[in-house]
Image (cartoon, rainbow, N blue to C red):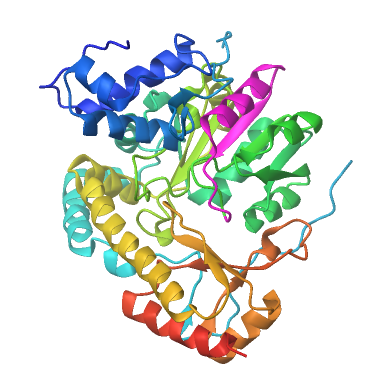
């Protein structure tokens, strides 16, 4: 029987303590693959906690792929879960331009690059801005450390520890002006003579960034567990770019076993790296955020990338890298004379926002708003399209979902009819490289920029447009 010493008066909830304890035993091999776990009733009785505590912990472990349930048999540890052992620290044709909305405007636009400006904490931001001007005054006009303001890097370190389980030093943080700039910088650090594996389908602007840098890329397919490790191993790539916590645009959450396969791939040859883009990890609605690859990395092979574009606003142009020691040393050696690409004033304001708890409160409010819109969109589509064969992806995270239509129309027919009714929708097929003819018509719908009332009206228009 599993026995753990849980602390009922600890700040960390009991279910989280139990989750971390079981997960640690799985990762260390103390609970090998195939092991049957005690029933919720048995474990609850042994640990003297409620069955709800055990059920919640098991649910999170199952959501992350550490365990699986078998009907009438219970929970079992997944196979092949072991962290890699620590160690000392043909060219592709240029892709098509990235997907972007046309200059035409529509009353209802399901773009994926929108956030709700109404969620932005303008009054708090204005108050903190005045405080920063008063406190730092002329110091804001001086050049900032090439890695960014120390105060902001320290706040990011605290955030990563508390909410993503990543333990790093401020010395490993690099602040930059958005994801595009940061990706250009990563390519310079890793080298243009490498082969990079990119998710396919994936973020089209990313393909453009790699093409501009003249590097060789390998579009790599996914399955239901995430990027296929066998396809990566069969390629000649030495760097792989991933969105493991919530793939864009498929919405796939990479399982724990697949994450460890990718980490093993990186550890099997010198100078292999993983670029982990955690672009919308704050918006997970049904369970705790999925642990980042950076949390599992023990060999210094993960370059962690994130921005405040989804969590605050894309116009702020603030993002950051978490660089392994070797790459940070390389950055300091090559780019120490570079100035920070983010204004000092903006960095100090964001640092103050995070330090006072404003960022955490903002995320909590925004998560509720976007979850309500996600639920409204799924309900509206099921209600209005009830007579049209369709399937809605029941995404538990992010700011978009997929709509699979089976009413006999092709993607371009669905899109053109929707546009004629004032609704803009986007094809999944265009996110593939090269673009493919999909086996079924699938649309990518971003819902962050529409209110619940607008969502309802848009669904009604789609019903009219798609009914033959």
- Image quadrant where one finds the N terminus: top left
Picture layout, residue 21 above or below residue 441: above
Query: What is the tally of numbered marks visible in this picture?
Result: 0
**Rendering coords of residue 367 (x, y %):** 30, 55
Quarter-wise, where is residue 249 in the image?
bottom right
Segment tinted magenta in the rendering: 249-276
Image spot of residue 19 (x, y percent) = 33, 25
Q: Is residue 16 magenta?
A: no
- Judged left or right of residue 387, residue 433 is right
Residue 158 in view (yes/no): no
Q: Which residue is situated farthest in the right direction here?
A: 90
Q: Residue at x 16, y 57 (%)?
A: 127
At which x and y percent is residue 375? 36, 65
Who is closer to the viewer here, 340 or 84? 84
Q: Kindly identify the residue that appears in the image at 24 percent across and 57 percent down.
A: 365
Could you tell me which quadrant the C terminus lies in?
bottom right
Q: Is residue 307 above or below residue 370?
A: above
The residue nearer to you, when weighing 148 against 25, is 25
Q: Residue 232: which quarter of the image? A: top right
- The answer to whether 403 appears left or right of 216 in the picture is left
**Which residue is at the front of the view, 274 or 288?**
288
Q: Residue at x 56, y 71 (%)?
A: 390
Q: How far across and down, in percent of the image, does residue 300 sit?
A: 55, 20
Query: Is residue 270 within the magenta segment?
Result: yes
């Amino acid at each position: 029987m599993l026995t753990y010493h849980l602390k009922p008066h600890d700040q960390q909830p009991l279910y989280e303590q139990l989750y971390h304890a079981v997960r640690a035993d799985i990762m260390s091999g103390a609970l090998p693959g195939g092991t049957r776990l005690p029933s919720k009733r048995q474990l609850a009785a042994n640990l003297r906690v409620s069955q709800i505590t055990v059920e919640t912990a098991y649910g999170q472990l199952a959501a992350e792929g550490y365990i699986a349930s078998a009907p009438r048999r219970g929970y079992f540890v997944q196979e092949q879960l072991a962290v890699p052992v620590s160690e000392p620290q043909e060219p592709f044709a240029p892709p098509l331009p990235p997907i972007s909305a046309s200059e035409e405007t529509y009353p209802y636009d399901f773009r994926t690059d929108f956030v709700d400006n109404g969620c932005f904490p303008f009054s708090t931001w204005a108050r903190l801005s005045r405080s920063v001007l008063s406190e730092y005054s002329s110091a804001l006009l001086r050049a900032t450390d090439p890695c960014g303001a120390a105060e902001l890097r320290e706040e990011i370190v605290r955030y990563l520890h508390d909410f993503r389980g990543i333990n790093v030093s401020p010395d490993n943080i690099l602040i930059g002006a958005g994801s595009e700039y940061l990706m250009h910088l990563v390519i310079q650090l890793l080298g243009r003579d490498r082969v990079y594996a990119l998710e396919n389908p994936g973020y089209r602007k990313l393909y453009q960034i790699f093409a501009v840098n003249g590097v060789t890329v390998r579009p790599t397919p996914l399955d239901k567990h995430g990027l296929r490790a066998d396809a990566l191993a069969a390629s000649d790539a030495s760097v792989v770019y991933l969105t493991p916590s919530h793939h864009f645009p498929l919405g796939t959450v990479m399982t724990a076993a697949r994450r460890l396969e990718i980490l093993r791939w990186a550890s099997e040859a010198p100078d292999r790296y993983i670029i982990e883009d955690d672009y919308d990890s704050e918006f997970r609605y049904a369970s705790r955020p999925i642990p980042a690859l950076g949390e599992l990395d023990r060999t210094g092979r993960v370059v962690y990338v994130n921005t405040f574009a989804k969590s605050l606003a894309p116009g702020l142009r603030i993002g950051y890298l978490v660089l392994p020691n070797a790459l940070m040393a390389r950055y300091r050696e090559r780019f120490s004379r570079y100035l920070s690409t983010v204004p000092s004033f903006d960095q100090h304001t964001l640092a103050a926002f995070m330090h006072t708890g404003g960022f955490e409160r903002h995320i909590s409010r925004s998560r509720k708003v976007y979850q309500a819109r996600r639920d409204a969109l799924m309900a509206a589509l099921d209600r209005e399209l009830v007579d049209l064969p369709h399937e809605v992806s029941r995404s538990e995270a992010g700011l978009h979902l997929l709509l699979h239509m089976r009413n006999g129309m092709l993607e371009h027919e669905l899109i053109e009819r929707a546009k004629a009714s004032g609704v803009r929708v986007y094809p999944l097929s265009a996110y593939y490289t090269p673009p493919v003819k999909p086996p079924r018509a699938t649309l990518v719908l971003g819902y962050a920029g529409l209110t619940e009332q607008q969502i309802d009206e848009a669904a009604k228009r789609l019903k009219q447009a798609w009914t033959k």
